Image (spheres, rainbow, N blue to C red):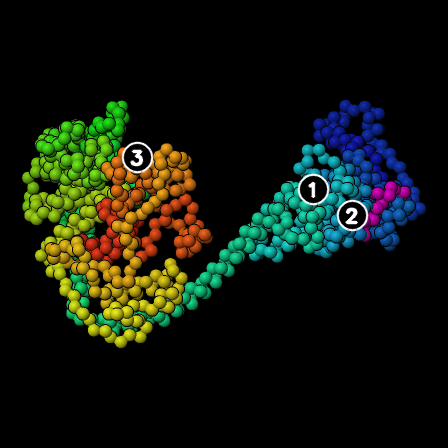
Amino acid sequence: MAPFSTGYVKGWRRSLTALVVADGIRSLDLYSELTENFKKSMSAIYGTVAHFSTLRDVVHCNRGISMAAAATRKAPNAFMFCRQLDVLRKAGDDQEWGSAAAIMKAFRIGKHESGAIANLQKHMAREVSEGLKDAVRIRGMKQFVLHETISREIFNSAFTSGTGVLEQWAVQLTNTEPNELALLLIERMKADWDRSSVRKPWGVKETTHLHSMCGAFIHFRSMFEAKVSSEEYAKHSQSLHSNFLQGFLDADLEHGLLTTVPPGDVTNIGFLRTIVQDSEKRIALELEEKEQELAERIANATLDSLKLKIDVDLAALRKAAPSPENDAIQAALDCKRGQSWVKTWMEERFQLILQPDGNMSQVLGQFAKFSAEVCKGGDQAHTLILVDATVYPANAQYFNQALQSMATVLHFGGHCIAHCQLPVMQSNTTSKALLNHRRSMEDMFVNNNLDVTVPVTLHFQKPADTSNNDKRRLSQLCLAVSSDSEKLMWSVPPVISQIPLVKVEDMRGFDDGSKPGPTARAEQKGVLAHEKILAAYLNGVTWPRNSKVLIFDMVPNRQAEFGRAALDRALATNQVPKVHYMGIMRPDMKSVVGELEQQIYKWWDESDESGPKQRPRTEQERPALTILRWAGSVPKLPDQVLGSFPVGSPQHNEILKLEQELKAVWPSQPQPERDSPAAPVRASALPDLTGARVLDVTREISAAHISAVCFDVQRLAFCQGKSGKPSILISKELDIYLGNLENTEIVCPAGELFGFFTGAFESKIVKGAVAAALGCLGEREVNSIPWRLESDTTLVSHNKKLMMVCQYVCQLAREDGLGEVQLEDHDMKPKMRAPEAT
């Protein structure tokens, strides 16, 4: 059909209704029932034919006619008129309609509508006009935007909202190719209109303000993109766009336009400041890491060069060392061999599992592996599980896991039995708590289908010379727990009598300054007592010659007394059955593990395979050196070598290792000590204090005296002095005061004021004013007392005895045969290395 061949159709809805009625009449076969007048009315079609002189008159007459207008009876808008003009051009009218005045005059419409039509036709990018058209089609012209808003050129190319107070931002707030600003404005208008509960059409003022916000967002977003990496921009761009469409960023953007001048600073925009600063910090850290990596490579190259030269001198020193020096080296090798023997023997016979996190989840796997090693060759080992709950463990979760694991092992068969010592009454608990603890254990056993029908009673004997203040109970109820007592391969004694208790003053872990409390008195019975309990179980069975018993100490007491008793039996020769032991040690039992290891080493040290214990020393000849320097009869590293690297750096530590190696290759002649043991020792180690600055601990210190009447400070902590020791007070300013609250004078010799394992150990770096005063590097140190060994002459307290670190190390070498030691959380531990080839 040719354009404008049909001028006007009236009554679209009525025509459609008539067609529906006619179709219904035909479908229902109702034609015969209609009246003649109705038939004539339905058969007649009435129309009006118009005659126009020009196509312009046709457009003007039909501009309000469209399917949508006819259906909704709404007034036409600028977008409908643009459609009519497009049709007019197709019909041959070649006039350009780019002037609002020409359109208004030719078609007799208002100035705002004609201006909107002109802008949509000639002054607006196609994608912008299409964006507006889509927005209006969905939301309605009357509801979404005014003709005046479009006519004011806000969406036109080259329009700028940078006027008035924003004039300096005119360039940044101008519509330019590729029309990003105008398209973002339409997107924001749609988002705000859709989100609003009270929807009003966009006016000129609101749209112009929103235009400036869109321009500011695009400008500062481009600055943000230039500031950060592409990955960082991609990470945040979507969220920034979403936040802008929701209006969250308008306040920051407006503040940036009003308080800064172009091009502005992205850090002045609140929502970008944090991101940019974090990115800059990350870039700075990456640059610093690269610089540190380069410095590290240079330092390593310097270290390699120095090590080559030092190794040459060390080789010359080793070659010149006479046989007495080799004897000393052999003594050290003997010590290492002893430690290696201890490690091997413990792996086979006496395993100590230290659970650092108090978790029993992996214990069963370790026990199964140990049990498989014990039963290698097809032998079956009887298993005796030990649970000492005399003092109910504070960590209930750990204890319940232990009992669950015990139940799993007991269900292996009748060769497994558990000796469980139930909680006892003491002054730090109540009858109700005691009953609850016992019931919780029994409930755990019953819930795991264990047999608890075999009770065992322990009868104790106090030492003959015990005091009247010893109120320890002389009996304790235990349970011999199994999976089925009728299938049990063990002979369980109902009563174990005449068990000797240790004297209170002989209990482990205490001295004159610290007495055992009620809990320790109830828990600690002595090694002899536990040996008798073990013997009662082991002696009740007739064992074949090659029998083995695996003792699984799942819940030892604080001093692991069952473990000490089992160790004495395992070290004894010709014992039947052969005892193998695995103990689960809690984190606070680290010192007990060290004591057991030292006991095993001392047993080896007295055996026939340990070798002689003395190595004499003679004077050595001095070879020529290249980089090392002689200081008297001792070769030393030059100061410039020691100062080549920062203190604490890996390279500096390597130099210190070389220095220690130098001392091992060519040690200085020791000075004799007054308290040197007369008996032969494996290593005659004595510290070389030549040139060392040793603190005189016998000097008298005259501190300021403050009368108790005048003493007024805010206390942070206080400890009452007793047994001739001073009282200690720590103020809230962390000052330490020593006090004498007695009527008699006390003498305070050098000794420890505070002990470890009473708080949390923390490693921290020191920096700043405190670091300058201490002469060390680091970050900061606030409200803490540092653990810092500045040299091997630093004073430490060991077993309440004050000594230098070097003296303590030499003592370990002489008395415990430790050729090398390392510091591990305030404990000296043997380095458990395999013996070197000789």
Residue 345 located left or right of residue 626: left
Q: Which residue is mark 2?
A: 164
From the viewer's perspective, is the residue at label 1 or at label 3 nearer? 3
Which mark, by number, is residue 741? 3
Separation of disc 2 and disc 1 at Cα? 27 Å
Kindly indicate whether the residue at mark 3 contacts the one at mark 1 (C-beta within 8 angstroms).
Answer: no
Q: In terms of depth relative to the viewer, which is nearer, 78 or 172?
A: 172
Q: Which residue is mark 1?
A: 190
Q: What amino acid does circle 1 point to?
A: Lys
Q: Earlier in the sequence, mark 3 or mark 2?
A: 2
In reply to whether residue 114 is colored magenta, the answer given is yes
**Is disc 2 surrounded by few (<14), some (14 to 19) or many (20+) residues within 10 Å?**
few
**Is disc 1 surrounded by few (<14), some (14 to 19) or many (20+) residues within 10 Å?**
some
Question: Could you say whether the residue bearing mark 1 is in a helix, strand or loop?
Answer: helix
Separation of disc 3 and disc 2 at Cα? 82 Å
**Which region shows up in magenta?**
108-122
Q: What amino acid does circle 2 point to?
A: Gly
